[in-house]
Amino acid sequence: MGKVFSALAVSVDGYITGRGAGPGHGLGDGGMLFDWYFSGDTPSREFDGFRLSQASARVFDETAARVGAVVVGRNTFEDSEHFGGGSPHPNAPLVLLSHRPADVSDRQRLVTTGVADAIAAARELAGGKDGKDSKDGKSGKDIGLMGGGVVTAALKEGLVDELILHQVPVLLGGGRPFFQELPQHIRLTLVEAVPAPGVTHLRYEVQK
């Protein structure tokens, strides 16, 4: 079965946006969190237009290639102006997790019954409920989580296998946090740390 993970750019003080995030201003005053996407000379194999450092390109493309579907939270969905009716990933469908109605396109799926159901829907889109090959020939791939609320909800239910922090060396001082309040400690195991220009890539396994 594919893994469930989150891979987000984050400041050293733990924010995934700056202040003032909203529709048309998805990162608020935290735009530098994405500078490393465009500050190198190595084109991404997965995302057109991204030019990263050689070290970042390896990590980014290996991570992006794993994704079969993305579960996105409502704030991220609205801040990103519904991803233009598509998805944050060029090759993976979007599942929106929201507790209230939302307009979604025919390329998106809305789930209102909780994060476990949203991940189950994403698994089906990514290649079958059990993570094995589906009838249409797709292989079960990993599920990406996007948004602090979604990540926290999935952590609370023990559904997250990995956390990847693309840590940018800046203190934003405010914005939307990667993690919200958790009911207990969650221990992590660092399995990879890759320093690169403008960012350090940290990959953790969630201990269960």
Image (cartoon, rainbow, N blue to C red):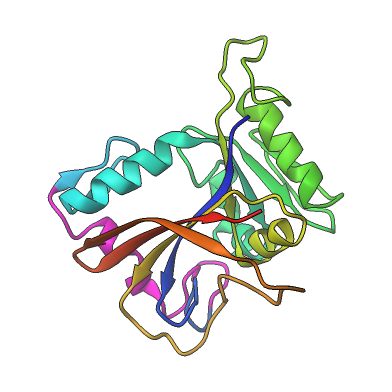
Q: Secondary structure of the magenta portion, mostly?
A: loop
Q: Is residue 24 above or below residue 110?
A: below
Q: Position of residue 42 (x, y in %)?
A: 16, 45
Of 76 and 139, nearer the camera is: 139
Whether residue 174 is visible, yes or no, is yes
* Magenta stretch in the rendered image: 21-41
Left or right: where 144 falls relative to 102:
left
Q: Quadrant of residue 188?
A: bottom right
Q: Residue furthest left?
A: 41
Q: Is residue 137 magenta?
A: no
Of 143 and 113, nearer the camera is: 143
How many labels were placed on the picture?
0
Q: Is residue 206 above or below residue 142?
A: below
Question: At x 71% / y 25%, what residue is drawn?
Answer: 130
Question: At x 59% / y 48%, what residue is drawn?
Answer: 161
Whether residue 49 is visible, yes or no, is no
Q: Residue furthest bottom?
A: 173
Left or right: where 63 falls relative to 200:
right
Q: Position of residue 185 (x, y in %)?
A: 67, 72
Q: Is residue 140 above or below residue 160?
A: above
Question: At x 63% / y 29%, what residue is drawn?
Answer: 1
Q: Is residue 37 magenta?
A: yes
Q: Position of residue 206 (x, y in %)?
A: 58, 56
Q: Quadrant of residue 196?
A: bottom left
Q: Position of residue 89 (x, y in %)?
A: 48, 42
Question: At x 25% / y 47%, what residue is drawn?
Answer: 57
